Structure formats: structure tokens, C-alpha cells
């Protein structure tokens, strides 16, 4: 799965999660936080404290909940 657009909207990871949290009928099926340049920085992108600084792209698969 390599389809994503770089620098699509420039929001923070925190704001992205806040937006998703406001949508009641949505499940996050998959999420990957990617560093901007070097893949060896990926563990830092997943860190709650350093993630904002080391995440360049968020890749996610979102699904509408079945009622």
C-alpha cells in the first residue's frame, strides 16, 4: 500500500486524531505514522512524546461502523 499524497493538508497528528475522535461512526482499521525522510526514525514517529516532531505522513484506512 504505497498510495498517499505528501503534504496534503499539513495538520498535526494530534489534530488528525481529534478530528477522527469526533466522528462517532468511524473505526480506524489501519494507521501508520511515517517519518518524513528516514525509515529508521519510525519508532520515534510512534512515540507519544516525540511523534509530532518525527511524523511526516499519516497513512490510515478508515471504515464506517456497521449498525
Image (cartoon, rainbow, N blue to C red):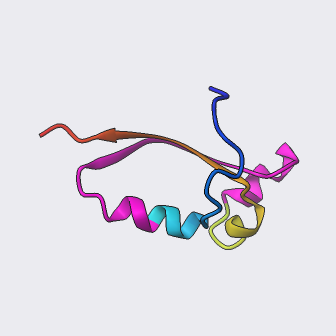
Q: Is residue 50 above or below residue 42?
A: below
In the picture as drawn, the residue positioned furthest to the left comes out as 67
Residue 28 lies left or right of residue 64; in this view the side is right
Q: Is residue 43 above or below residue 61?
A: below
Residue 40 lies left or right of residue 53; in this view the side is right
- What x and y, as percent, mark residue 43? 75, 54
Identify the residue at horizontal 83%, vertical 44% (top origin).
39
Foreground pick, 9 / 46: 9
Q: Is residue 65 above or below residue 41?
A: above
Instruction: Name the image quarter holding the N terminus.
Output: top right
In the picture as drawn, the residue positioned furthest to the top comes out as 1
Residue 52 lies left or right of residue 28; in this view the side is right
Identify the residue at horizontal 33%, vertical 46% (top origin).
27
- What x and y, as percent, mark residue 2? 67, 28
- What x and y, as percent, mark residue 40? 86, 47
In the picture as drawn, the residue positioned furthest to the front comes out as 8
Identify the residue at horizontal 43%, vertical 68% (top origin).
18
Identify the residue at horizontal 69%, vertical 65% (top origin).
51
Foreground pick, 11 / 35: 11
Picture quadrant of residue 20: bottom left
Q: Residue 3: say if magenta.
A: no
- What x and y, as percent, mark residue 24? 24, 57
Q: What are the residue bounds of the magenta stretch?
A: 18-46
Q: How many marks?
A: 0
Picture quadrant of residue 67: top left
Q: Residue 26: say if magenta.
A: yes
Amino acid at each position: 500500500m504505497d498510495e498517499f499524497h505528501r503534504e496534503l493538508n499539513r495538520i498535526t497528528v494530534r489534530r488528525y486524531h481529534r478530528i477522527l475522535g469526533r466522528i462517532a461512526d468511524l473505526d480506524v482499521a489501519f494507521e501508520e505514522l511515517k517519518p518524513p525522510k528516514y525509515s529508521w526514525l519510525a519508532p520515534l514517529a510512534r512515540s507519544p512524546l516525540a511523534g509530532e516532531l518525527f511524523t511526516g505522513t499519516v497513512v490510515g484506512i478508515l471504515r464506517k461502523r456497521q449498525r
